[in-house]
Image: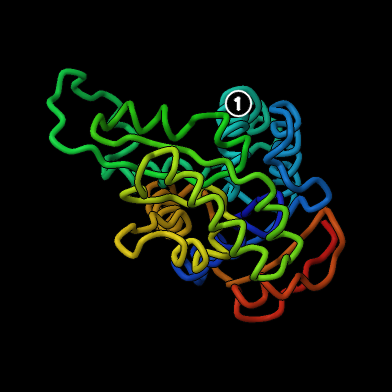
Amino acid sequence: MSIGVFDSGIGGLSVHHALVRRIPGADFVYLADQANTPYGGRRGEEIVALTRAGCERLFEGGCDLVVLACNTAAAVALRRLQQTWLPAYRRELGRAVNVLGIIVPTIEAATGLPWTHEARDRGEKIEHLDVLGIFSTPATAASRVYEIEIDKRRGDVAVFSQACGTLARDIEAGAAEGELRAAVEGHVRALTRRIGRPPDRAILGCTHYEIIADLFRAALPPATPLVHQPDATAAAIERYLARHPEYDPGAGGRRDFLTTGRPGAQNGLIERFWGAPLHFDAA
């Protein structure tokens, strides 16, 4: 068996890379839905249907566990799939399968609290307000998942989301570094204007953005740390597998890369991030 990693495109490779470092012996199948990327501007029902189709492809290919390495899919589709699709689908397959996302471990890392800690004292006295900036796709920003879930847990964290328009599409297309730098700087300026000052911390709430994390790092003040989703997700998946031996991650160190789009080599931007050429086979 193996672990499936699903994204609308190449952005989820940032999560895949962290998972491989954390669990090097496991077998991984990466699926990029490049025929339908990006998801950030799509309607909710489209995102749910596309995410379900990707998970089915990975489960039918032998994966026991699928990680949604896409904030948009996790924010819009994950809960729906877990509640209304997975129970019947498990019975149909006749084995244990599950879908996990990247938002839960990111919120745990941002709040310093476990996901199960949803109650906070609404009358608590707040001595200092921690301003957290989220850079994300329009669909993730519109879902307000980070604002809602963090507010359940921490009253001293104020969340401001900045929708980054076509940035994921530009990264997917391998846009020039100067073009990407200008776009990142513009989004950082826009968020800073809305807050009235730079955020105290920031989350790159789209896995595509981790590929150009150095540009965000350069655009933000040196004192503004980044909460890295890939590392938080990889650590959470390792803990999950230790608690759930019914999900078999494999032990052969296999690495398969699939795409619903054009198979072959990926753009130079992702190859520089990965550290080697990547060839995608047709899904």
| Quadrant hosting residue 279 | bottom right
At 67% from the left edge and 75% from the top edge, which residue is drawn? 271
The x and y percentages for residue 125 are 12, 26
The x and y percentages for residue 21 are 47, 70
| Quadrant hosting residue 72 | top right
Task: Tell which of 27 and 116 is nearer to you.
Answer: 116
| Quarter of the figure that contains the N terminus | bottom right
Taking the image as shown, residue 235 lies to the left or right of residue 210, namely: left
> Where does label 1 land, which residue?
80
At 61% from the left edge and 56% from the top edge, which residue is drawn? 183
Taking the image as shown, residue 203 lies to the left or right of residue 186, namely: left
| As drawn, 154 above or below 231 | above
The x and y percentages for residue 224 are 33, 57
Residue extending farthest top: 123
Amino acid at the residue labelled 1: Arg
The x and y percentages for residue 241 are 44, 52
Camera sees residue 66 = no
| Quarter of the figure that contains the C terminus | bottom right
Taking the image as shown, residue 192 lies to the left or right of residue 5, namely: left
**SS at circle 1:** helix
Camera sees residue 162 = yes
Task: Tell which of 121 and 118 is nearer to you.
Answer: 121
Give the mark count: 1
| As drawn, 174 above or below 132 | below
| As drawn, 151 above or below 100 | above
Task: Tell which of 24 and 150 is nearer to you.
Answer: 150
Is disc 1 surrounded by few (<14), some (14 to 19) or many (20+) residues within 10 Å?
A: some
At 34% from the left edge and 58% from the top edge, which residue is drawn? 225
